[in-house]
Image (cartoon, helix red, strand yellow):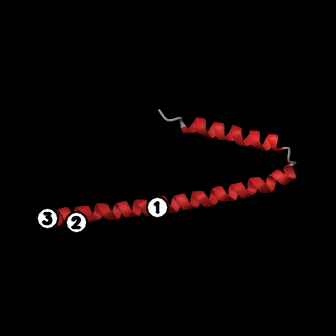
Amino acid sequence: MNKPADLIVEETRENLSKVINESGLPPFLIEPIVRDIYNQVIFLKQQELEKSKKDYEESLKEEKEEVQHEKDTI
């Protein structure tokens, strides 16, 4: 069984907090680092969304073509 997503989220949150707390950097230096990481996550999320949309539209197109092919062979 794969680890549940909520456990992965909690572990990730704890690991990130640990790294930040153990870095020894003051908050004014941590803030731009966290902002940069956040911006990367936003970019990756947008790419994933666009890929999902493209894949979904392609699957709809393929389904439509299959239905049309079945109609043509009848």
**Residue at x 12% of width, y 63% of height:** 74
Element on which disc 1 rests:
helix
Residue nearest the viewer, comparing 5 with 21: 21
Q: Secondary structure at mark 2?
A: helix
- Which callout, 2 or 3, points at the residue further toward the start of the chain? 2
Nearest the camera: 47 or 18?
A: 18
**Would you call the spot at circle 2 few (<14 residues within 10 Å), some (14-19), or many (20 or more)?**
few
Q: Is residue 7 left or right of residue 50?
A: right
Residue designated by label 2: 68
The residue labelled by disc 3 is: 73
Instruction: Residue type at mark 3: give it.
Output: Thr
Measuring 38% from the left and 63% from the top, which residue is drawn there?
58
In the rendering, at what x and y percent does residue 6 appear?
Answer: 58, 37
Tell me if residue 61 comes above or below residue 34 in the rendering.
below
Disc 2 versus disc 3: distance between alpha carbons?
A: 9 Å
In the displayed structure image, the side of residue 38 where residue 63 appears, left or right: left
Q: Earlier in the sequence, mark 3 or mark 1?
A: 1
